[in-house]
Image (cartoon, grey):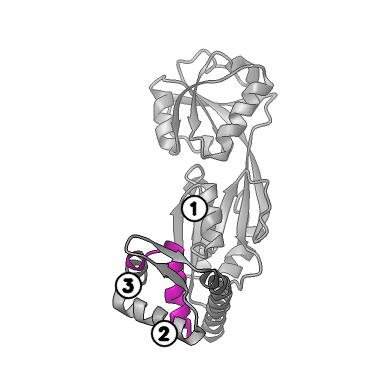
Amino acid sequence: MDIRQLEYFSEVAKNLSFTKASATLHVSQPSISKAIKNLEQELNVPLFYRTPKKLELTDAGKAVLVNAKLVLESFYNLTTELTDTMNLQNGEVRIGIPPIIGAAFFSRFITHFKATYPKINIVLTEVGTLKIKKGIEEGLLDIGFICNSTNQANDIEITKMLKDPLMLVVDRSHQLASKKAVHFSELKDEDFILYRNDFSLHEKIIQECFRHDFNPNIVCESSQRDFMLEMVEATLGIALLPSKICNEINNRKIVAIPLEQSNLNLELGIAWKRNKYLSFAVREFLSMSKQHKLLQ
């Protein structure tokens, strides 16, 4: 039994498909089939039920998969640690960020980090909070920035970094545009342009409307703040955006106004996998993000 066999087996078990495993691993199907057959012979037990139309794990296969994941993770941790020992200045940090925040929160810090460690590569992936958590759990991401997450998963560590209040965004011709502050209850007759329902702020905004005794009239949902701003400029409705994003709006046709009697905030935390060896690059990124005014 070797690492290669366990890696091939785990990928096939994950997809229940030799074809998909072959494409992911960039290894021919015959090579994968042979490696798994040899593994079954060594263990003296079948790992898959094979039919022309279906592939399923046997009970033995399920048991092997659980332990294979532990072995592979230990092996990857070892190789990463050895790489760190040999060269502390190189590396890569794979970071998940929600589309809602983007460069507004990170550009200055990443510039500072790259100036300190020019050989460390930063790989950014824009996905929602749920996919960020999944990416961290599966080892596809090293770090993720999580929005409004209250659940502390068993295998994910989350440190809160920021609470940024939401502001009302309207077109300059809107009846509320001249006000210095707007009471949340004044929005009851407005058309709302919201984040998609897979964004945590979507539900929070709706609940805040309920708290003020009205049901919001939602005319559009999007994951892209730029599109939301274009919809506001086109007088199709109002939007609620984090103040840090509002402060960077460079559009004279749009106005951002503070909200009164509102509990709406973008709560941002930084997440990583608990009990996993973190590379030098990842450790430094975490350390600097806490010391530097990354989210101020």
> For mark 1, does the 10 Å Cα neighbourhood hold few (<14), some (14 to 19), or many (20 or more) residues?
few
Q: Position of residue 98 (x, y in %)?
A: 50, 47
Q: Are marks 1 and 2 in contact (CB under 8 Å)?
A: no
Amino acid type of the residue that numbered disc 1 sits on in the rendered structure: Ser
Q: Is residue 136 above or below residue 64?
A: above
Choose the circle earlier in sequence order: 1 or 2: 2
Amino acid type of the residue that numbered disc 3 sits on in the rendered structure: His
Residue matched to label 1: 107
Most foreground residue, 15 or 269: 15
Which mark is drawn over residue 38? 2
Q: Residue at x 55, y 33 (%)?
A: 202
Q: Residue at x 44, y 70 (%)?
A: 48
The answer, for residue 296, to whether it is visible in the render is no
Choose the circle earlier in sequence order: 3 or 2: 3
Nearer the observer, disc 1 or disc 3?
3
Amino acid type of the residue that numbered disc 2 sits on in the rendered structure: Asn
Q: Position of residue 51 (x, y in %)?
A: 36, 65
Choose the circle earlier in sequence order: 1 or 3: 3
Which mark is drawn over residue 26? 3
Q: Residue at x 57, y 36 (%)?
A: 201
Q: Is residue 4 magenta?
A: yes
Nearer the observer, disc 3 or disc 2?
2
* SS for dot 1: helix
Q: Residue at x 55, y 13 (%)?
A: 189
Q: Answer left or right for 162 relative to 6.
A: right
Segment tinted magenta in the rendering: 1-19
